[in-house]
Image (cartoon, grey):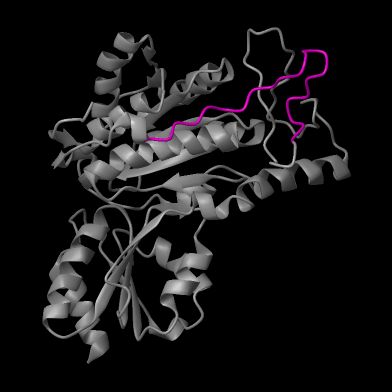
């Protein structure tokens, strides 16, 4: 059945995407500007046989999500600002224990309490390095209400397929913005469920992987013994200090994403074929970037936009490809230059790299981008 046009808020679209991806458990704590996700899930989950729990704090929220995921349920939590900081230790636990879950972070202005209702994109590095130690992570970022829906489904799929925590980096602008959208038909959407073990409980090793690098999982309560610990462990889940075992297991955590880098890397391009000047952006900053290139082209300046939907793992191959042979590259983001650090590290000709930043809680305007480009051109 074809879906009808709707006027949806970004947070609502994210919630609907989670439901359509099969999420049936939500635990969290209300915090601006993510609260609408909790409100939506509280109303919608019981109607489809799911469970919603408002926990006493942010730490308990992700703890409950991890517990639910261990029972075989697709689980999600949402937060913002200080709440994302509070979840970091258990995000690391989910990475080490390879428990599928999705953490939505509707970014707001910081640090500390900052501006709860003001937009920002300052959690790029925290999404990758917020928890301690080396660990793999996937982080996606939408630039529209429709993408808030489709990329949430991708986030749930990735968490299930690769057994990793996935960070969904919304921002206050996209989270609270309303747009007319027609959601794609569910029959055309790929929905992925985790790979479950087919061996007997006596044969089961929770961290024994085949050539995919991803171990099959057993749901708690189905008769399988599974030692879940954040300590370094072997294939049985038992803690170990053997260097060769640790190296093998920790290397596998990274390699299981490395071999699927092309599948995980999502992006869009706009007018890049003949572009002499390239704008790289993500999330809400993509929108003024698109408006800017339209005006720049009217003034005879060939500009295009590379929109990153996958932030982590960082799409190095894509950056190298699209920054080659340009006269100028501009990274547009609402922070002091976090994504630009990665672009600078990756691209070959750093002399043509420019930053377009804003950190005062106001959206970057097309004119501010145009001024930076024209300054470089002249």
Q: Is residue 361 left or right of residue 165?
A: left
Q: Residue 65: give x, y in percent of width and height.
A: 48, 22
Could one spot residue 81 in this view of the protein?
Answer: no
Verify whether residue 191 appears in magenta: yes
Q: Residue 153: give x, y in percent of width and height.
A: 39, 35
Q: Is residue 2 left or right of residue 92?
A: left
Q: Quadrant of the C terminus?
A: bottom left
Q: Residue 341: give x, y in percent of width and height.
A: 46, 67
- Residue pictured at 74% horizontal, 35% vertical: 209
Q: Nearer the viewer, residue 38 or 193?
A: 193
Q: Quadrant of the N terminus?
A: top left
- Residue pictured at 46% horizontal, 48% vertical: 126
- Residue pictured at 29% horizontal, 10% vertical: 47
> Does residue 171 lie above or below 63 as drawn?
below
Q: Which segment is the magenta one?
A: 189-209
- Residue pictured at 67% horizontal, 37% vertical: 214
> Does residue 170 lie above or below 195 as drawn?
below
């Amino acid at each position: 059945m074809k879906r009808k046009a709707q006027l949806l808020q970004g947070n609502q679209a994210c919630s609907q995407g989670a439901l359509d991806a099969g999420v049936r458990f939500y635990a969290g704590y209300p915090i601006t500007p993510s609260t609408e996700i909790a409100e939506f899930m509280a109303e919608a989950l019981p109607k489809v046989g799911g469970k919603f729990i408002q926990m006493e704090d942010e730490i308990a929220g992700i703890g409950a999500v991890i517990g639910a995921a261990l029972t075989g349920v697709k689980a999600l939590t949402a937060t913002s600002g200080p709440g994302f900081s509070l979840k970091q230790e258990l995000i690391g636990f989910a990475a080490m224990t390879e428990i599928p879950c999705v953490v939505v972070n509707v970014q707001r202005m910081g640090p500390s309490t900052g501006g709860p209702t003001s937009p920002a994109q300052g959690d790029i590095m925290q999404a990758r390095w917020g928890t301690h130690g080396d660990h793999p992570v996937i982080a996606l970022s939408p630039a529209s209400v429709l993408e808030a829906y489709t990329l949430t489904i991708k986030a749930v799929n990735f968490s299930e397929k690769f057994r990793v925590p996935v960070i969904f980096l919304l921002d206050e602008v996209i989270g609270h913005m309303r747009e007319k959208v027609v959601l794609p038909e569910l029959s055309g959407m790929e929905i992925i469920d985790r790979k479950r073990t087919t061996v007997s409980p006596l044969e089961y090793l929770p961290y024994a992987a085949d050539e995919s690098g991803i171990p099959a999982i057993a749901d708690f309560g189905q008769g399988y013994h599974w030692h879940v610990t954040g300590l370094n462990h072997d294939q049985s889940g038992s803690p170990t200090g053997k260097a060769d075992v640790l190296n093998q297991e920790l290397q596998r955590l990274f390699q299981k994403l490395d071999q699927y880098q092309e599948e995980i890397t999502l992006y869009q391009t706009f007018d890049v074929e003949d572009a002499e000047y390239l704008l790289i952006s993500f999330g809400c900053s993509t929108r003024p970037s698109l408006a800017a290139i339209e005006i720049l082209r009217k003034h005879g300046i060939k500009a295009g936009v590379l929109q990153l939907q996958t932030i982590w793992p960082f799409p190095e191959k894509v950056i190298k490809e699209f920054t080659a042979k340009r006269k100028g590259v501009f990274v547009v983001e609402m922070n002091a230059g976090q994504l630009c650090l990665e672009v600078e590290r990756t691209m070959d000709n750093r002399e043509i790299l420019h930053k377009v930043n804003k950190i005062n809680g106001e959206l970057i305007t097309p004119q501010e981008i145009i001024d930076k480009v024209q300054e470089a051109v002249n």
